[in-house]
Amino acid sequence: MTAAAHRPATLEDVARVAGVSRSTASRVIAGTGFASPAARELVTAAVDQLGYVPNPAARALVRGGGGGVRMVVAVLGTSAAVLDDPYVHRVVGSAARVCTAAGVGVALQWLPLGGSRSLDKLAEDRTVCGVILINTTEDLLDGVPRSLHGRVVSIGIGSATVPSFDIDNAAGSDAVLRHLYATGRRRIAMVTGPRWLPCAQRPVQTYRRLMSQAGLPERVLPGDFTAARGRVAAGVALRQWPDVDAIYSISDDTALG
């Protein structure tokens, strides 16, 4: 896990910068109770300065019940078909198991490749207490609104403002390929993941390194994590390299195809 370089601002930070009590800062931000015009101006300025974002989940828990608060699992992909990936379902299921106890719902959303407006809408939605990004790219990280900082995490690559958790798929690829080699396979083809996805490139690099070390030919075919593409790639491999004795895919769905 990588940690964000700066922790998100808290209500205590806002009160300190504004020079008011925590309860006064809370009343101004929530829009409830009495606060003088001067205090409101100071708190508002502090909120803007710090980029403070109230935690709607915490509010819901204090008031009792989820109140429509939700955690959003946002998946980047070329089409909404990415939502059918079993890996995505496992992330949603895990999030639901954790969030249910806190009275927080979980929603799944497709982020179109190259579309940054979707994150802006999530940032503006006051019912969104957090966002989990899947299939993260550098462009997507660059487009994360400041108001989401402290409420967003990435599975994959991260940045100074977006913490990340990653899966060591390079080591996994190494183990699979060494197993194939140990069982006598010498003409191994590989079906890759999308070229635009950073985490999908590590297994390809591992494959090329191991094939080079073993003096074996490289046979790389493009993939996109779908079963349909896996079926097409397998056909191409068998026609192009009739002696192929193993086909390795980095996606379960592609391997099924």
Image: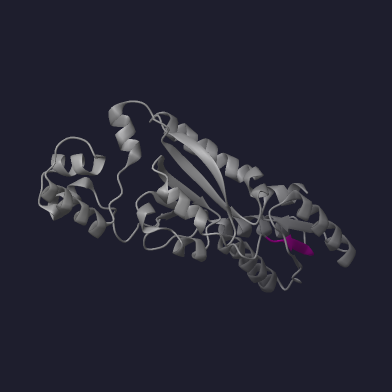
| Residue 2 point in image, percent of width and height | 39, 57
Most extreme residue toward the front is 37
Colour style of the rendered protein structure: one colour
Q: Is residue 93 above or below residue 147?
A: above
Q: How many marks?
A: 0
Q: Residue at x 85, y 62 (%)?
A: 236
Asked if 40 appears above or below 64 in the picture, the reply is below
Q: Is residue 43 visible?
A: yes
Q: In the rendering, at what x and y percent does residue 113 appear?
A: 59, 59
Look at the picture and state if 60 lies above or below 197.
Answer: above
Q: Is residue 188 magenta?
A: yes
In the rendered view of the protein, which quadrant contains the N terminus? bottom left
Q: Position of residue 156 (x, y in %)?
A: 50, 56
Q: In the rendering, at what x and y percent does residue 199 appear?
A: 56, 60
Name the foreground residue: 244 vs 89: 89
User: Quick check: 250 left or right of 171?
Assistant: right
Q: Nearer the viewer, residue 9 or 94?
A: 9
Which residues are drawn in magenta?
Answer: 186-192
Tell me what residue is drawn at x 87 percent, y 60 percent: 238
148 to the left or right of 187: left
Q: Closer to the camera, 37 or 90?
A: 37
Residue found 66% across the figure and 53% down from its top: 79
Residue 242 shows up from this direction: no
Magenta stretch: residue 173 in it?
no
Q: Quadrant of residue 187 in the image?
A: bottom right
Please state if 192 lies on the left or on the right of 98 as rendered. Answer: right
